[in-house]
Amino acid sequence: MVDDISHEGLRALLHEEGVSFQAVKTFKASIDPDYDAKTARVLALYALADGIAQPGPGDPTTVFCVDEFGPLNLQPHPGKQWAPVARGKGDPAAPRRRRRRATYTRPHGVRHLLAALDLNRDRLYGHITPRKGRTQFLAFCRYLRSLYPAEVRIAIVCDNFSPHLSTRRDDRVGAGPRRTTSRSPTPRSTAPGSTASSRSSPRCAPTPSTAPTTSPTASRPA
């Protein structure tokens, strides 16, 4: 025990003992009862897309990863810029500290990005929509289905966002797309009804800066 120690002495002592200051991160273990089955299914689809495994009877030959991002809206942020030097008290029309008006209302609404990564073609598709409900999700899935011939079976890996889970009960999904399109949800990360996020993002995790947008397909109202 020592009564006093300098910062340099403490640093040298910790260095000799192999101790460093490290950040601690948290994680959540999934409590999904079907975790093993869902994880194995998603990993099997990734293996098919990467060419590690060969598709068997009834297996899809094309895999999409679908996710949503939003709301997207323009927000002013403080920053730095080059500007003329203000001398003396400055000009009231050009004050020393320039400010950018903040916006708190969205009179024209916000936008959402629905994106899909085609693991076979290594291409990212995206639709910008005012909402990200079941109607928009089904319209986007119909667009993905149209990218390949009807006889090609495709698989869509998505998270547990509620519009994804309710598509099986929607009458707008025809029998043909049901036979050639399968949905593989990722395991749930937390308990149902929890205030924490109950979704687990799929492989794509798209960002708006890299997603080329295409014209959304027409869809009937919900």
Image: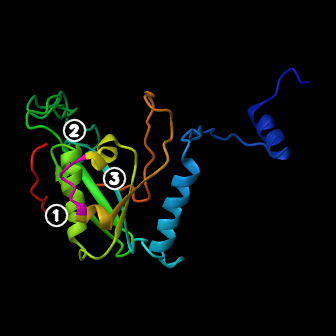
Provide residue 74's location: percent of width, then percent of height. Answer: 19, 42
Provide residue 51's location: percent of width, then percent of height. Answer: 49, 78
Q: Quadrant of the C terminus?
A: top left
| Residue 115: assigned label | none
The residue that disc 3 covers is 67
Instruction: Depth check: give the residue in front, 174 or 138.
Output: 174
Dominant SS in magenta:
loop
Instruction: Identify the residue at horizontal 45%, vertical 46% (top origin).
Output: 200
Provide residue 27's location: percent of width, then percent of height. Answer: 58, 40
Which of the 4 image quarters holds residue 97? top left
Q: Are marks 3 and 2 in contact (CB under 8 Å)?
A: no
Assess whether residue 127 is covered by the magenta stretch: no
Q: Quadrant of the N terminus?
A: top right
The residue that disc 1 covers is 214
Provide residue 191's location: percent of width, then percent of height. Answer: 50, 33
Rounded to the nearest whole Å, what is the CA distance between mark 1 and mark 3? Answer: 16 Å
Instruction: Identify the residue at horizontal 34%, vertical 68% (top origin).
Output: 154
Q: Which SS class for mark 3? A: strand
Instruction: Depth check: give the residue in front, 167 or 48.
Output: 167
Q: Which residues are magenta?
A: 170-175
Q: Which dot, 3 or 2, sits closer to the camera?
A: 3
Total marks placed: 3
Which residue is situated farthest in the top direction here? 3
Which of the 4 image quarters holds residue 108? top left
